[in-house]
Every structure is written in C-alpha cells, then in structure tokens.
Image (tube, rainbow, N blue to C red):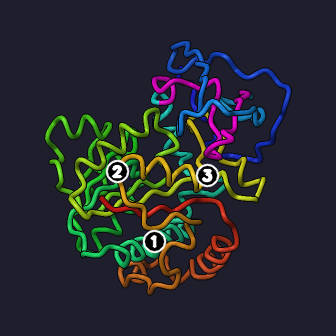
Amino acid sequence: MTTILAKHYSLPQKLFCGLKPTSQLTIASQPIKFKSVPECPVCDSRVVQNYGQVKVTVARRDVVLNYDECKECGSAFQNPVLPGKGRRLIYDESYMQNYGSDHVNLQSPNEHIWRMVMTDNRFQSLLELAPKRPQMYLDIGFGRGLTLEIAQLYGLKAFGIDVSYAAWQEAREKGLNASHGELSGVIEKGIIRPGSMDLITLFDVVEHYDDLMRELGLIRSILRPGGMLYLHTPDFSTSDQENKHRYFSLDHRFIFSQKSLRSVVEAAGFDVAECAPSQNIGNPDHAIHPAIKEDPRFEAAADYVEKKSSMLYEGHWHIGLVAFN
C-alpha cells in the first residue's frame, strides 16, 4: 500500500519541540530511511541551529519532521531529510487530489473560477515584465495545468513537465501539451532543445528539489539569452508565524528566505530583477480575460473571487522572483 500525504498543505501544523523526529517511513511498500544533513542545502553553511519539530499527517498517522534554520542565508530545511527517492514516490493520484487544497474543495465551481482569475492576473504581470513578448513557454511542475491553459489564451506555445503521472494524465485529457517526468529526461530525449524557451515558470516547485543548482543549470540551458525565469515559493522570511509553518511538509526539502532564494539563483548565473513578496510582483488589477468571463460559472462566483482576492493581498506567504538569462 502506498503511504502518501493524506492532506497536502493541510494545517494547522504546530511546532512540537522535544519530540523524536521520524527516522523511517514505508512508501509504496518500501522502507525509506531519513538521512542526516550536516550543512545547509542552499548555501552549504554549517552555521545552523535547530528550529523545531513539526507534526504532519501521513496516511492518517502523525509523523514528526525536524527542521533546522541556517543562520547565514535564513532558509529552513528538513534534517534529517526524506531522500529524493522517497519524496518522488508520493506524487501519485492522491497527491494530486489534495494538491494545493488548503481546506478548499478543488471541484467547487467557485474555487475553479477563482484560480483561473488569479492565474490570469499573475500571467499578465509576467507578460508585462518580459522585455520581449514570449512565444515559447514552459511550466515546470504544472500541477492542474491552469497556467498552461491561461498561456494558450494569450497565444503562447505552452508546454508543461510534471513528475506526477496523475497530473500528466489530467493535462492530456484537457488537450494540453505536456510531458511526464523530470526536466533532465525531457532534455535527454530532445523534447526541449537548448536555448529554445522564452519564459519558464516554477510555481511551488523549487522547495521540492534535492539538487537545486543542478536543476537551475538545466533550466538555464534551455532558456534563450535574455529569456525570463519566474519562481514562486513559500517564504520563510515572513513575520507571519502561522503561515511560516504551514508549508512544512513531507515533500518540502526546504523553505527559502528572500535572501537565500536570490543568492542561489544568482549563483546559478541568472540576473535577478525582482525578489519580493509574490503579491508585489506586477500589477494586481489586470482586466480578466474575456474567455474566463464567458464561463457560465463566472457570474455566480463573483463574490467568492472578490473575497479571496482581498485575502490574497492581505498576507505575505510566498516569494516571487523574476530573473533573466
């Protein structure tokens, strides 16, 4: 039986300092041992201290994860960490059913319209920030595929990659151009050519990587000179303690601070143009694309969309980073 996150991003999670961290899990009938990490996986500093233990729910039982905090770059990271093999096993259909759920019904028409509006607004901001109108677009970790759908509305040739087979199946059913697997495999198969992409986005993906520098190197190799990269990830530098802890989960290798995310992206050879709370990236007041307004569910969802939009700009939960190759 597969052991997976029962409620991905489900909280409240609280710190339980003093509990013994979990040392082994059974995932897909395989015993996976956690591995100790002697240094910060973001900046390699050994100036770290214990941040605390976090209790998360896995297959209806509590699991205790230990997190350390790097005093040099300000990141938090899982230590001991579930190895990449173990984390990859959790990206199955159940994971997709709970992807980004945060106590909401993803099948709700109101929630679907809200996510379309939010994604549309975010994508328009990215198009404005690009010095040249992008044509070739890649979304790594596309999840439910909304960004690919929105990109097509604006005439971009959109392609997605996701390690979740269930995500790939859903994308194919929608007629989206997508591939199942990791970026390295897609490049090796020649599906994406070096220097071919104008815009690459990763929404809530970089916190999952084992070797972030390697992945950023691969991304840079397929981004054309002057092409744009956008990263969106939970922010450990927020002063909101509840939301600081809400993204500690089994599949999150680490949680970045704004300082650490900027540093690692610059170290990979990118020119960082902006690194700030994600709601401060771009213009929050774009006109909604006509195709979304034409959805028969749009009018009934108007109040819900307005309420959630106001909540989004009240909090500081994620980092948005814009960089160029």
Q: Closest to the observer: 276 or 104?
A: 276
> Could you tell whether 89 is left or right of 19 in the image?
left
Q: Which residue is mark 3?
A: 257
Task: Give the residues drawn in magenta, as a range.
Answer: 63-87
Q: Residue at x 18, y 53 (%)?
A: 195
Q: Which residue is mark 1?
A: 122
Q: Which residue is mark 2?
A: 269
Other residues around mark 3 within 10 Å, as few (<14) / some (14–19) / many (≥20): many
Pinpoint residue 157: horizontal percent, then vertical percent: 21, 64
Pinpoint residue 237: horizontal percent, then vertical percent: 67, 55
Q: Which of the marked residues, 2 or 1, is nearer the chain's N terminus?
A: 1
Q: Closest to the observer: 1 or 25?
A: 25
Is residue 137 positioned above or below 188 on the image?
below
Q: Secondary structure at mark 1?
A: helix
> Could you tell whether 234 is left or right of 229 in the image?
right
Depth check, mark 3 against mark 2: the one in front is 2
Q: How many marks?
A: 3
Does residue 153 show up magenta in the picture? Answer: no
Depth check, mark 1 against mark 3: the one in front is 3
Per the rendering, the mark at residue 104 is none
